[in-house]
Image (tube, rainbow, N blue to C red):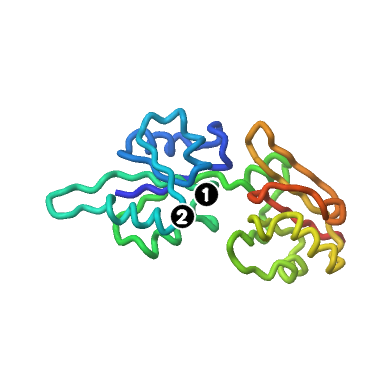
C-alpha cells in the first residue's frame, strides 16, 4: 500500500491529524530531504529520495505484493497538497499499485488565510518545473497565484511583470509557516533584485 501524504506548508502545526496517523502507522516514510528533515517527531524508518526516478523505483520494488511476500506500507511525503501541482499525478501514471492520498494545506492557502484574502475567483497556476504562459494568464485574470521554482522565481517573474508594463501589486510569501517566514507586498519594480526562496508563492493582483 502506498500513501501519498500532504505535509502542508511545512510547520508541524499545519499537518493534518490524519496525515500524522498514517505516518505513525506505516512501515517506512520516503521523501525529499527538506520534508524528511521536518519529521523528527515521527519514530519510523525514513529514507531520503533524491529524484522522482529514485522514488518511483523504490515504490515499485517495495510497495507491491510479490507472490507470498506482502509489500511494505509506504508513506511518500509531499509538500503542500499532493494533488495541487504535486507528485500524486506523476505517481498515479507510473505506479500500478494501490494509492491513498492524504490531503494537505497548500502553501498558497496558508498565505491567503494569513492575509485574509479570498482566492475564490483567482487563477491558480504553477511555473515550478513547467512551462506556463505567465504574462498572458496575468493579463486576463484580476488575481493570479503562482508556485515558483529556482528558474522561474519571484524575482524573475517580477522582472517579467515590469518589462511588460503590467499595472499590478504583488505579494511574495517565502518560508511560509516557519520561524523565518517572510511576506512582502508592493509593486513588481520593488523586487527586481530581491533575493527570495526558490519555493516562494507569488500573488499578482491587477489594478483597476
Horizontal placement of 15 versus 67: left or right?
right
Whether residue 160 is situated above or below residue 202 in the rendered picture: below
Q: Where is residue 191 in the image (x, y as percent from the top left)?
A: 82, 52
Q: Residue at x 45, y 34 (%)?
A: 17
**Taking 24 as reference, is 141 left or right?**
right
Q: How crowded is mark 2: few (under 14 residues within 10 Å), some or many (20 or more)?
A: few
Question: Residue at coordinates 47% horizontally, 34% vertically from top-left?
Answer: 39
Choose mark 2 or mark 1, whichever is in front.
2
How far from the left and from the top, in percent, is residue 21?
A: 39, 34
Which quadrant of the structure image shows residue 5?
top left
Front in this rendered view, residue 54 or 141: 54
Q: Name the residue under label 2.
A: 51
Q: How far apart are marks 2 and 1 (CA)?
A: 19 Å
Q: Against 184, is 153 above or below?
A: below
Q: Residue 81 carries which label?
A: 1
Whole-percent x, y for residue 88 in the image:
44, 56
Instruction: Tell me if residue 126 can be seen.
Output: no
Amino acid at each position: 500500500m502506498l500513501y501519498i501524504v500532504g505535509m502542508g506548508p511545512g510547520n508541524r502545526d499545519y499537518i493534518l491529524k490524519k496525515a500524522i496517523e498514517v505516518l505513525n502507522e506505516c512501515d517506512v516514510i520516503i521523501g525529499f530531504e527538506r520534508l524528511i528533515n521536518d519529521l523528527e517527531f515521527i519514530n519510523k524508518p525514513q529514507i531520503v529520495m533524491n529524484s522522482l526516478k529514485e522514488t518511483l523505483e523504490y515504490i515499485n520494488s517495495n510497495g507491491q505484493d510479490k507472490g507470498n511476500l506482502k509489500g511494505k506500507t509506504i508513506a511518500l511525503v509531499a509538500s503542500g497538497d499532493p494533488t495541487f501541482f504535486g507528485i500524486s499525478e506523476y505517481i498515479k501514471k507510473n505506479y500500478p499499485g494501490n494509492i491513498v492520498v492524504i490531503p494537505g494545506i497548500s502553501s498558497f492557502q496558508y498565505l491567503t488565510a494569513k492575509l485574509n484574502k479570498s482566492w475564490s475567483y483567482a487563477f491558480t497556476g504553477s511555473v515550478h518545473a513547467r512551462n506556463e504562459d505567465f504574462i498572458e494568464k496575468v493579463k486576463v485574470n484580476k488575481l493570479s497565484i503562482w508556485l515558483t521554482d529556482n528558474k522561474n522565481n519571484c524575482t524573475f517573474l517580477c522582472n517579467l511583470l515590469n518589462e511588460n508594463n503590467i499595472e499590478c501589486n504583488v505579494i511574495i510569501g517565502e518560508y511560509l509557516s516557519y520561524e523565518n517566514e517572510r511576506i512582502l507586498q508592493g509593486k513588481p519594480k520593488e523586487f527586481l533584485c530581491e533575493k527570495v526562496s526558490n519555493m516562494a508563492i507569488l500573488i499578482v493582483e491587477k489594478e483597476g
